[in-house]
Image (cartoon, grey):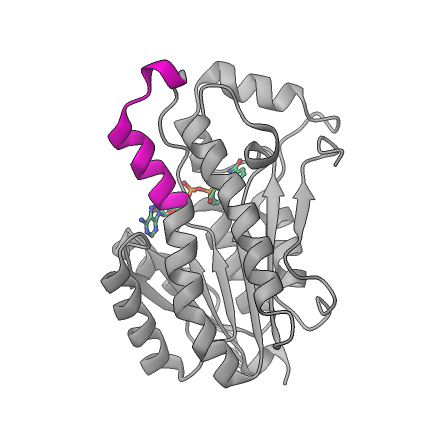
Amino acid sequence: MNAQSRVAIVTGGAGGIGRAIAARLQHDGHRVALWDLDGDAAAQAAAALPRSASAGTSLGVRVDATDEASVASALRATLAHFGALHVLVNSAGATGPVANVADCDLAAWQRCIDVNLRSVFLCSRAAVQPMLAAGFGRIVNLASIAGKEGNPQMSAYSAAKAGVIAFTKSMGKELALTPVRVNCIAPAVIETPLLAQMTRDALAASLAKIPMQRAGTAEEAANLVAWLAGDQCSFSSGATFDLSGGRATY
Ligand SMILES: NC(=O)c1ccc[n+]([C@@H]2O[C@H](COP(=O)([O-])OP(=O)(O)OC[C@H]3O[C@@H](n4cnc5c(N)ncnc54)[C@H](O)[C@@H]3O)[C@@H](O)[C@H]2O)c1
């Protein structure tokens, strides 16, 4: 089976990185469902993807990826539309509260953990059976270098992304003897609307740590995800792939 007959879900598909990933997967021949909390933006992003002869039209689905029933309903809609599932990219996320731990609001902390980590659990759990039934599966999670290093004043985000890295390791091992591969990427700064959620100082500090002295692009993230979503990613699972302009050294 090649990408021409595969179905991919991209959560956060209306966002900067998710949208670029959806475009790349569609370009490669996948039929793509863009899941997003902003249903209108997901529908618009899906409609804006160039229609290809092999992939046909893509689908925009409103979902709250932190909500079990909403994820189940979005999966039903996707399977009803496309008939199968082969690739899941968990890109929904948000930076959450920017505050010292001593000043961090509990509700804001929990929301950040939910959108970045609970969502990955709920969507990945829902995807396993359809992927096993299809005989092929690739799950790619958007972690962050914050999950490896810990960003100051971003403890909830850093903890959630560290959780995504550990969740990926765990699930990758669990499914190692199946045709499903589970990996994550750990970007440093990628030029998207998410950066508007960071303070100017935090953004400048993150950029200053990148040896290539620039932010990455959403297309560069999509290139790596496209490889992780395909056949050539066959002997890697539970792994974390850096995308940091030379910043990550371990
Ligand atoms: N941009 C960066 O520098 C960077 C760096 C490292 C990691 N990441 C991670 O990459 C992923 C994508 O980031 P981005 O820059 O595209 O962000 P973005 O803000 O542009 O897009 C995030 C998308 O997620 C959606 N979303 C939020 N909550 C949701 C929910 N509950 N259910 C469904 N969708 C929801 C938003 O509506 C939005 O469309 C995130 O997980 C982010 O943490 C980004």
Percent x, y for residue 14? Answer: 39, 52
Question: Who's the residue at 76% across and 33% down the image?
Answer: 249
Q: In the image, is residue 111 part of the stretch drawn in magenta?
A: yes
Q: In the image, is residue 181 part of the stretch drawn in magenta?
A: no
- 180 versus 162 height, above or below: below
**Which quadrant of the figure has residue 123?**
bottom left
Percent x, y for residue 112? Answer: 35, 37
- 220 versus 99 height, above or below: below
Q: Quadrant of ligand 1?
A: top left
Question: Who's the residue at 44% across and 33% down the image?
Answer: 157
Q: Is residue 40 left or right of residue 51?
A: left
Q: Is residue 171 left or right of residue 126?
A: right
Residue 142 in view: no
Residue 211 in view: yes
Q: Nearer the viewer, residue 233 or 237?
A: 237
Question: Who's the residue at 31% across and 53% down the image?
Answer: 41
Q: Main secondary structure of the magenta part?
A: helix
Q: Which residues are magenta?
A: 101-116
Question: Who's the residue at 56% across and 39% down the image?
Answer: 144
- 137 versus 48 height, above or below: below
The image quadrant where one finds the C terminus is top right
The image quadrant where one finds the N terminus is bottom right
